[in-house]
Amino acid sequence: MEGALVDLCFVRYNAEHDGAARDVFPFAAAGGRPLLYCFKSTGGYVPDAALDAARLPREKWRPAVADHYRFVLSRAAVDGVLCTLASNAEVDALCSALDEGPMTEEEEQYVVGLAHLGAGRARLGG
């Protein structure tokens, strides 16, 4: 895009705050646009202790922090994320999560549901 005023945009997008999926990403054309990076990508991560307290069965998938980066990077409009990885183990975990490829819509909905559960905006049925 010749003469563009913006080269890089930042948007908060995560499982707990997923409004950009409706409000931003559909309007981000595939080409000729600024780079779009997300921040606070792990918002909505729910630790095991909280999932235990919510009575999520142990055999259910419990997304790790790295899965939340995968959640964000599953969106085609997202060019990257701001993140600070503190160890080689965290880098390895992120690489392993990304090797799984983009999340399915069902996986995304599950991660959002857990984020809402962790924030007290949802409850497990039964």
Image (cartoon, helix red, strand yellow):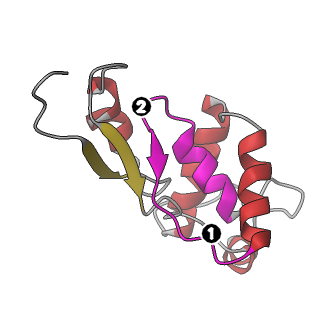
Q: Which residue is mark 1?
A: 46
Q: Is 77 within the magenta?
A: yes
Of marks 1 and 2, the one in the foreground:
2
Amino acid type, mark 2? Ala
- Say whether residue 54 is visible: yes
Which quadrant is the C terminus positioned in? bottom right
Q: Residues within 10 Å of mark 2 (few under 14, many from 20)?
A: many
Residue 39 or residue 34, whichever sits in front: 34
Residue located at (50% from left, 53% from top): 15
What percent of the width, then of the height, locates residue 37?
39, 48
Q: Give the quarter of the image for residue 36.
A: top left
- Say whether residue 17 is visible: no
**Relative horizontal placement of residue 11, taking residue 45 as reference (left or right):** left
Residue 31 or residue 93, whichever sits in front: 31
Could you tell which of marks 1 and 2 lies nearer the N-terminus?
Answer: 1
Name the residue furthest right: 59
What percent of the width, then of the height, locates residue 46?
62, 69
Q: Which residue is mark 2?
A: 77
Range of magenta residues: 65-87
Amino acid type, mark 1? Val
Q: Give the quarter of the image for residue 78.
A: top left
